[in-house]
Amino acid sequence: MPTKSKSLKPKVAVFKFASCDGCQLSLLDAEDELLDVAGAIDIAFFPEASRRMLKGPYDIGIVEGSITTPHDVEHIREIRKSCAVLITIGACATAGGIQALRNWKDIKNYVHIVYASPEYISTLDRSLPVGSFVHVDFELRGCPINKYQLIEVINAFLNKRKPNIHAYSVCMDCKLKGNECVMVARGIPCLGPVTQSGCGAICPSFDRGCYGCFGPMESPNTQALAAQYKEVGESELDIKLAFRTFNAYADAFRKESEAHEH
Amino acid sequence: MDKTYRLETEDLERLLQLLQGEGYETIGPTLGNGTIVYDKITTAKDLPKGWTDEEEPASYRISNNGGERMFGYTLAPQSWKRFLYPPLRELFSIRRNGKSFETLRTDSEEKKFAFIGVRPCELSAVLIQDKVFTAGEYRDDDYLSRRRNAFIVAVNCANAGANCFCLSMNTGPKAGEGFDIALTEVVNDGGHYFVAEAGTDKGATLLERTGGIAASERERGEAEEVVERTASQITKSLDTRGLQEILAENQESPHWDDVAKRCLTCGNCTMVCPTCFCAAVEDSTDLSGKTASRTRRWDSCFTLDFARVSGGNFRITPKSRYRQWLTHKLSSWVEQFGIFGCVGCGRCITWCPVGIDITAEVSAIKGERVKQEKGA
Ligand code: SF4
Ligand code: SF4
């Protein structure tokens, strides 16, 4: 195969909305793979990493962060138009993020507490995922995402194949690794059975229950898991709070937390 | 030659050393992180002396009773499947070579395992997987090479768990066939010793070399008592009479909806089951696209991708997934392989995070059938 000339490399842009930057930093954090990645793609726009800011259109747009302002809405629509493929990364971009906790409250009250001149603040009443506004080609979960999964998605795109990203439970990863189930062996409440794999089952590997950072798995039976939480001694409030974290506004988690709100 | 020996506890150490001397990696029960796990052991000191486990649906707890038993626990969370059929394995890779490509088969690692402490139900599971992987048209060479090299020391059960139902499945608590050596651990006022039975010539030779002496009739009787006592502890059962047909005829039982409400579709039951053998095959590439590789990974009939085919998915609902799993184990498996796909180890009950019990689900399905017949 002839080596691709630089201009033939796919042009990639990285954009940020309401988020902590942790996910896009995963790309920079992939030290060992970074040179390969940089060799395979043309990073045309990545303000976090480089001053080079080429104009679109782009072959791949990677978006971090949730949509929280009217300006964000306009901006994401423009981005969508300029990107052939749009990939959203992280709990903010795929579920609204931890900031979506405000979705249960009246935002006006917060604005008054936080800002001296609230009249200058223009905000939406909810923090929402990118997919609520534009079509997204692939959503990569996690808070933060797993850098190997990000590279896998880019790799799959470059090689025109399906990414090996699984939507099954964290339990599958625990069992593949040979972890002992923390809920069965110790009675530690764990969101693993309803959470999508991808982190490598980090918390159960260190004797913790899963916090649900990767959001709901493909067919989450949150109600059945909540019933088991009671069996291991969790209160209604515990259950509500367990589902109300980084992926609080992901449909399945949102509904389950609301079911325990009294 | 009398094939039953009496081994002292020190002889067990010698047995391990002899196996290691012959190049075996000795794998056995040892204390894990809150459980008994099967892992590499080097000496008899690694065995979980005094440890027992208590199992309930969705619960497993260990404790040390200060006793002498080295094999006083019931079961580890995962079976020997991990060693014979590893969860992840590269099958081959392909390298681009100018305009063509070359395929490199990933060689099987030469593994020589000696499994110490295989429970009778687990041994039956190994024999079932032998059928699946080696008897049919599609032979799994990697499994075959690991299996052929394996030396099996079975240990008959001295302590049945609340989820064991080997009696119903005819797989325990005493090992019948398939072992090189079968041990029964006897602890009583008379002392602490093992009664060892050789199942193969290789096993017999090793027992001779460990210095075991012929077991007396009394000792053999005491070993029998251990197994009988264990059998009498077993409370869980599964009525297998006509089960294959009953399940095949009750695919539309309303009870499948009931279990679907509880099932998390997490896949734990399939992962811990010693007979479940499904795997997914995944292709990956390096970033440049110059090399690609194909990997096999344990999969589960509870994942959505499992039944995704061109044009759709034929098992979308959790109900259809649970039904597939249970009816495969206890009905269509018989059609396929001539035996049940369940050995009654109870792992799927213990390690199901919500404690779904395969025996209870079967009873409920039968009950529904009776109800409907009466109503009709
Ligand atoms: S189906 Fe359950 S009880 Fe039967 S062999 Fe598998 S894990 Fe053991
Ligand atoms: S039966 Fe239990 S272990 Fe199996 S998929 Fe359902 S919830 Fe998970």
Image (cartoon, coloured by chain):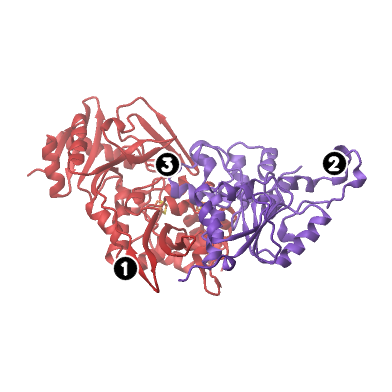
Q: Which residue is mark 2?
A: A110
Chain A image colour: purple
Marks 1 and 3 in Cβ contact (< 8 Å): no
Give the chain ID for the red colour: B
Res. B12 in view: yes
Identify the residue at horizontal 56%, vertical 60% (top origin): A154
Q: Which of the two marks, 1 or 3, is nearer to us in this view?
A: 1
Front residue (pair A240, B161): A240
Residue A213: % across, % down? 62, 46
Residue A76: % across, % down? 75, 60
Q: Quadrant of residue B246?
A: bottom left
- Neighbor class of circle 1 (other Cα within 10 Å; few <14, some 14-19, many 20+) is few
Respond yes or no on whether mark 3 lies under 8 Å from ligand 1: no
Q: Which residue is mark 3?
A: B162
Amino acid carrying label 3: it is Ala
Cα distance, mark 1 to mark 3?
37 Å
Residue B157: % across, % down? 30, 40
| Numbered tag placed on residue B138 in the rendering | 1
Q: Quadrant of residue B298?
A: bottom left
